[in-house]
Image (cartoon, grey):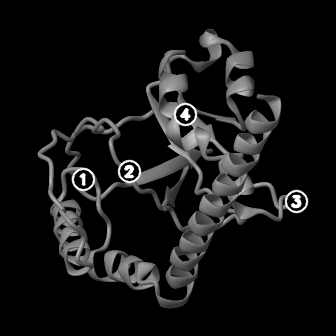
Amino acid sequence: MKIKFLVLLALAGCLFVSAQTEDEKRLRTIYDTALTDGKSYDWLRYLSLQIGGRLSGSLQAQLAVEYTKKELDGLGLDRVWLQPVMVPKWVRGLKEYAYVESNGQKTVVPICALGGSIATPSSGIEAEIIEVHDFEELKALGEAQVKGKIVFYNRPMDPKLINTLHAYGGCVNQRGSGAKEAAAMGAIGVIVRSMNLRLDDYPH
């Protein structure tokens, strides 16, 4: 019985290795085809340059969905379908304008509202600006120093990180969660620097 059992185990092992090898070959073929005859860069180029920004609920977002479905249909897949979904829609208002006043002099600051942000009152907002580099520094100030102020997050990408994804990821939380963190401490507004390495006048 032991000999028969061992033989069966050996045969099962051989079949598994054989099947695994066939699977590996098929996956390698798919992988190689994607690299040598893929369309991903063409799709990305069209989405970025022809359709443009695809903010949730926008016409461009709808065009991107329709374009993607058309391309997938063209691949001959078994079935491609769209599912109706509810998405938030944010509409940009009038062009943003901001300035910093110091010692009686005003300096205009190029600025761009972040998608999803709360609209500024028509009368505008005017308050003292406090600069912080991260949430820890914000919390260290305490609510008494933050309440009623405009918080300016000024943390650039770390130039020592060669991997730009890591550098970007190390500072982007101030854009994603900065307003929430500041509002929790009573701030009435937030300004976030561009996520880059430079000091420039180009909001994005």
* Residue at left offset 33%, top offset 82%: 46
Q: Which mark is residue 149?
A: none
* Residue at left offset 58%, top offset 82%: 32
Q: Which mark is residue 160?
A: 3
Identify residue for label 4. 178
* Residue at left offset 48%, top offset 31%: 179
N-terminal of the two: label 1 or label 2?
1
Identify residue for label 1. 92
Q: CA distance from mark 1 to mark 2?
A: 8 Å
Element on which disc 2 rests: loop
Q: Position of residue 76 (x, y in %)?
A: 23, 77
Q: Position of residue 141 (x, y in %)?
A: 71, 18
Q: Confirm or deny contact between disc 1 and disc 2 (CB under 8 A).
A: yes
- Quarter that holds the N terminus: top right
Question: 30 or 115, which is in the foreground?
Answer: 30
Identify residue for label 2. 113
Q: Amino acid at mark 4?
A: Gly
Element on which disc 4 rests: helix
Above-or-below relation of 11 to 117: below
Question: 164 or 155, which is in the foreground?
Answer: 164
Q: CA distance from mark 4 to mark 2?
A: 13 Å
Above-or-below relation of 78 to 124: below
Judged from this view, the residue extending furthest toward the front is: 1
N-terminal of the two: label 1 or label 4?
1
Element on which disc 3 rests: loop
N-terminal of the two: label 3 or label 4?
3
